[in-house]
Image (cartoon, coloured by chain):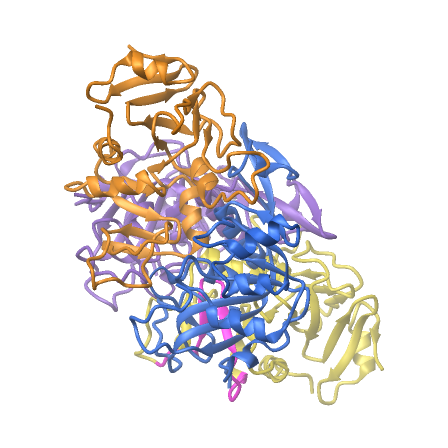
Chain colours: A orange, B yellow, C blue, D purple
Amino acid sequence: MPFTRDQMAARLAADVPEGWCVNLGIGIPTMVANHVQGKEVIFQSENGVIGMGPAPAKGHEDPWLINAGKQLITLSRGASFVGHADSFAMIRGGHIDLCVLGAFEVAENGDLANWATSENDTAPAVGGAMDLAAGAKRLWVVMEHTTKDGRPKLVERCGYPLTGLACVRRVYTNLAVIDVLPEKGFMLVDLAPGVTLDEVRAKSGATIHAN
Amino acid sequence: MPFTRDQMAARLAADVPEGWCVNLGIGIPTMVANHVQGKEVIFQSENGVIGMGPAPAKGHEDPWLINAGKQLITLSRGASFVGHADSFAMIRGGHIDLCVLGAFEVAENGDLANWATSENDTAPAVGGAMDLAAGAKRLWVVMEHTTKDGRPKLVERCGYPLTGLACVRRVYTNLAVIDVLPEKGFMLVDLAPGVTLDEVRAKSGATIHAN
Amino acid sequence: MINKIVQSVAEALAGVKDGSTVLIGGFGSVGQPDVLIEGLIEQGAKDLVAVLNNAGVGRVGVARLMELGRVRKIICSFPRSSDPVVFETLYREGRIELEITPQGTLAERIRAAGAGIPAFYTATAAGTLLEQGKEVREFDGKRYVMERALPGDVALIEAWEADRWGNLVYRGSGANFNPVMAMAATLTIAQVQHIRELGELHPHMIMTPGVYVNRVVQVDRGGDWVKPEQA
Amino acid sequence: MINKIVQSVAEALAGVKDGSTVLIGGFGSVGQPDVLIEGLIEQGAKDLVAVLNNAGVGRVGVARLMELGRVRKIICSFPRSSDPVVFETLYREGRIELEITPQGTLAERIRAAGAGIPAFYTATAAGTLLEQGKEVREFDGKRYVMERALPGDVALIEAWEADRWGNLVYRGSGANFNPVMAMAATLTIAQVQHIRELGELHPHMIMTPGVYVNRVVQVDRGGDWVKPEQA
């Protein structure tokens, strides 16, 4: 059985060590926060929140506390605030241990495409994705293994406009966990329960190495 | 009678309008703060203090409150603190209305020399002088009109290494107040009581214009 | 006596000229100078360049300003929103220019303008479409893009508390773009919820010293828990 | 559990390598990591590049480190002090290198290192002796100097309060170079007067988020009014 979205987030969360400072993108990445219980992890948000806690309980929302996805949040003990310039200084200066993003495509050289689906996109929206791709200490992608119509998202070279070059270190999909190694490319780490390497290879657009 | 050092500071202080944010250098410039009573002026110090008050009364010193001259200070109501990078962002970004510095030489094109007395100076100390010269909205110099041995400090071209180019807008000396005008050079504003224009001209190394 | 507090939104926005570059603070619903934007709509300045993170939601605020044809160009990181109808229509019809800048680059370009830095290098966008038209340079074997400072004629910002010197204290995630925008404009106008006596704000809590602020107008929504209208 | 608090100065300084670039916070007597500097003297690392505002006073602290021949080069804005005897002797004898940087450029170069900016332009020092050897460039008709980022291997900093995440609150003018240096080093070590429980420090008072801090050691001088020894 391939992983559900929630299981993908949980699988990724299991690999996050205590103490890391982590920035989570919108979508499945955001769900990672629900699965690190028991470990102290510092969640940073581009809009200047360092140390986000879980979503607020009904009736306890503070409208001045939101994350980069514009969702209401709470603060952990130890949280602090900075403005946007200082927040991105933290991101671009290499102080975020891990950034987790979704993707349209990941190439075997680590290139990431996740912001625009065409060079002629009307008004593509980049947000902080390029800053995170260029600046975080490491970038993991969590995404479905293929598009809805079955095309591979793990590819030899990205066809969509790039977000960052050679920046993806690891990919978590519904089928597998795959490292992106310099010079080598995609290397299988782990399969979802009941999924075979052959299936992963059949649904990928680039060679998937395995030991 | 030429101005005393204190009178020079007072003469300058009289020209500072209420509401300006002012950075004072070490020496006579520091004394300017004593002469702005009755006007609300915001004194900024390079080490990140915005809104310095007068020197502390005996027994009320706070060792954590010093200015860029390393002297103990107090805070005005409305004071705030920033770190060095933000303090110099304020200085270099043109947010200081006035900087008052001493000088070795001021040239008629507005060049300032106040940090080193020779190109071979052993370990010259620049501190924040070049940042202030390049960044403040306007720079006024307060200094004796001549050196101790009588050489002019108002000159056609600086002989000492420069702190900043074409940055001095006005000079307050023990003899006179003199504007530095673009294209025109030194223009007399005011004489100290009993001092003549001829005396000022005799003690200057460049033309002193007068209307 | 220094007193930057003005008594009306109209007074706060007096003198904003046609053709101005307007920096607009806020991120999501938090820290938006929504009342100042309404004031700018009233005030009438046109041919504006708007610098902000998003390109407006629905038909209010910045979206309304655009719909009225008052915005010539928008510089932002994320033109999409939950309801970007106005921007998308204008953009499709070629009636508004768009400059996309990565969010961190946007913040840093504004800071640079405030800090006297005309240009700087960043790895962000290197090798991507967004480096097109920009100078690229290697340092220590790595590729960087040169980005230019982005100053404003006017900044419209929001804060929680202010005093008559214009010192500002933000609340929660309300700082966001507001402190850098305050540094980078010739005329910085702040909308605040609470006015405090001089000396009441803690010196270490003031994130924007009044030196950066020209005018403050109070927009009291009556306490801690009232959400800004644009949310 | 995250816990950056270490139990001794020796533990705080463990692993500092020969040849390290060491950023040292403080301005005047305030915000000096004096106990950490003594610890570094004990620790033994040599061939150091010291980055700080002044070049040491008397024969203690950084001056002592230099006198022991452990500092190869100093990068500072103001090598003079009330008693610069050690530095001046070494410098005259050619036993220490000196790089003079304007104070604001020093702070901005360190910030750049912390913010991922390899180089930036500034008007400071343009047309002066201190632009020599640097790239000069015009923007909009004005002359600027290109300055490179200045990262550290180690930063020694001082703060008033810390918690186990390494969040730091400064006191008075004690921030000075400490926050930027904390951002710019691989290993940031903070000497603090007070340790607080996590959550006790106000989120808006924390000037240095713990993300930038690796180790914290408490040096309690017993309250508000005790002056650091190096004053």
| Percent x, y of residue B53 | 43, 78
Q: Which residue is at 49% across, 49% downward? A: C80
| Percent x, y of residue B5 | 60, 79
Q: Which residue is at 42% across, 65% downward? A: C230
| Vertical comparison of D170 with C194: above or below | above
| Percent x, y of residue C193 | 39, 75
Question: Which secondary structure is most common in the magenta stretch?
Answer: loop
Q: Which residues are magenta?
A: B35-57
| Percent x, y of residue C61 | 50, 66
- Residue extending furthest toward the left: A38
| Vertical comparison of B174 with D7: above or below | below
Quick check: can you spot residue D185? yes
| C149 with respect to D203 (left or right) | right
| Vertical comparison of B56 with B92: above or below | below
Queried whether the magenta region covers residue B54, the answer comes back as yes
In the image shown, does B184 or D92 lie closer to the viewer? B184
| D142 with respect to C229 (left or right) | right
- Residue extending furthest toward the front: A149
Instruction: Tally the numbered discs.
Output: 0
Queried whether the magenta region covers residue C21, the answer comes back as no
In the image shown, does C42 or B87 lie closer to the viewer? C42
Q: Quadrant of residue D23?
A: top left
In the image shown, does A115 or A152 lie closer to the viewer? A152
Q: Quadrant of the C terminus of chain C?
A: bottom left
Quick check: can you spot residue B125? no
Q: Quadrant of residue C130?
A: top right
